[in-house]
Image (cartoon, rainbow, N blue to C red):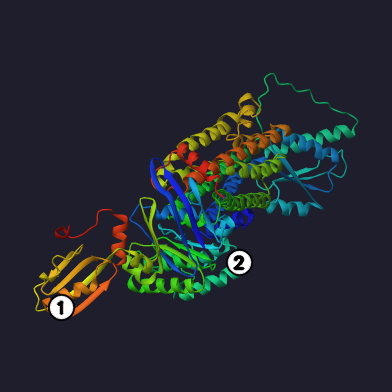
Amino acid sequence: MSSLRSIWLVARRELIERGRSRAFILGLILTQVFIVGGLLLQTTLAGGANVVRVGYVGQPPAALREIMDGIAEQGGATLDLRTYPDRPAAESALLSDEVDGAYVPGPDSSSPGQLLFREAPDARIQQMVTAAVQAVRLIDAGIVLTPPGVETLQPASGPDPTSLIIANVGVIFLFISIFSFGYWVLSGVVEEKQSRVVEVVLSTVKPRDLLMGKVLGIGILGLIQLVVLVVTGLVAANVLGRFSLPPTTTPALIQLVIWFILGYTLYSTMFAVLGALASRMEEASNATMPIQFLAMGSYFIALLVVINDPSGTVARIATLIPPAAPMVVPMRTALGAIEPWEVLLSIAVTVVFIYGLFALGARVYSGAVLQTTGRIKLRDAWRSSRQERRRP
Amino acid sequence: MLEILHLTKRYGSVVALNDATFVARPGRLVGFLGPNGAGKTTTMRCIFGLAVPDAGETRWNGQAIDQAARLRFGYMPEQRGLYPRMKVGEQLSYFAQHHGLSARTAKAAAQRWLDRMGLADRINSRLEELSHGNQQRVQLAVALVHDPELLVLDEPFSGLDPIGIRTMTEVLRERAAAGVGVLFSSHQLDLVESICEDVVIVARGSIVAAGPIDELKQSSGRRHLDVEVEGGDGVWMEGLDGAVVLEHRGGRVKLLVEDTVDLRRVLEGAARAGTIRRVSYEPPALSELFMEAVDPEPALPEEAR
């Protein structure tokens, strides 16, 4: 039987058995609740302040819209300008909380027009509309006011808050996903050893194929969870409507998926090897300590260093270190602080690393997975698998 | 035919197998005997590529056993194990597919074997919900589900109740009758004697006896002579060359004699002592052959030495 069929049979078993397990379904539901809840919280706390909703009776001149946009942007907000055919329509929109203020222009550009509010005037809208209307009237009068040039002596670098949120949430989810599904691989390997079923399986399946199928099957589940999560997040963000996504969102999300695949494969291979070396779950958990340090270290580099200086030296170096890349690169991408060639190079380096790791890992795994008593030394597993390779 | 040729396997300084050679013919039940640690499990693991021998090889029908050949074998390891939380039917079908069956035939085969094992109503139960005995049946079904050409079972009878033993025996006989090779290890020597045609005895990694049970018994140099004489005091057998008295109770005497013994002379002696009520002259039981083969010091009663 071909290796591919064996691998797929193993992967499919993992998919079906674990896919309908309570742990997976519950995890799926919980993460949905978490992301939708998080978005809701985000919009109620900050979203209202970030979008300025203004109604306009008639068709606003292009210059007016442009100026208002500019003012809103300076204030760190976005303008949501809606047009209404007449004053009653604008008033009812105001009363039904569709907009926070509405402007009724005068019969010609020389008249000041009327700014309507529901309960009390909104200072920001008042300033914005007043400035814009005055500017347009000056332009119409042939006076072009050029605002003074702006220069900062010590520009504060820092991405906009939405990017930061996406970067943070993305990396946290990535970390959690990689670890929870990597841990499934670990426990799966140990369970197979502990229940001795591995001997039956390996009487027809090559150890390498078993390892690959297991990593693949559980990885597909992880990917399903991640994709469902991203889709829910995007849909929720759109439905809530008050959450404007920065242009770095799409590449960041695509990379989230890519880096989940790479990060998961990398860490779960390490987990599988450790699982094979142990004979009980407690033993395996203790043995994962070094990997946990490695992952936590990478995670904190991303969360504490890279986020503050996304194109600094540490960030650039970490980008090329495979265990750190899955957390550092998506963060830099979300912050818009990485060159495309850096991403490609990082992916290439990580893929090569995973290839080597898998080759070594599969060998140790074959040497260790059939020894069901006590903890096996790495060196012994390595040696015993040298013979394993001669297996016809 | 399964051929085990000059198999040698060391684990560090421990020699698990030392130039072990024997054959197992299809259509016959072959018992694989030996004390614990003699090398039975290692031999079976070598057949399935789970252990790689330092020297020697395993062949099936004249060809070195490879992964493709193993797909047509069924294996029941000493350490039983299946997926505890997987449904019984799906589990059988999963292993059948690993042996190359298509999804549909695998499902049908799973159903068929569960029927055969009397577990048809448990097809959707998780394995862990089954009793120990029923889990054993499922384990056997996993070894059989793909209609293998060769069955290798490591202590299939251990832990079975009498009904389980009967089912197991029936299945193994039926498979052998269908032309399948059946090699199984066991410590239940009387059971092996009653159901097997052939045995292989391994001790300390070496094969010490192999062949049809009847031939092994006949070729043994000893016989059990059991004579009951009424009215005699039993002194008739004194001075009998090479005879060992195993038991002497009243007129009944159990002797271990050389097979070259002159029976007529012995019986004439007995007849002079009294009236012969009963005589049996039998080759030793398999358990004795086993003890003799694996233990250089014969385990005879103290006074008989």
Q: Quadrant of the N terminus of chain A?
A: bottom right
Q: Residue at x 87, y 45 (%)?
A: A107
User: Can the viewer see residue B142 in this picture?
Assistant: no
Most foreground residue, A120 or B228: B228
Most foreground residue, A199 or A321: A199
Q: Secondary structure at mark 1?
A: helix
As drawn, the label of residue B103 is: 2
Tally the numbered discs: 2
Chain under disc 1: B
Residue A143 placement: quadrant: top right
Residue A131 relative to residue A11: left or right: right
Q: Residue at x 23, y 72 (%)?
A: B263
As drawn, the label of residue B271 is: 1
Give amino acid for label 1: Ala
Chain under disc 2: B
User: Can the viewer see residue B216 in this picture?
Assistant: yes
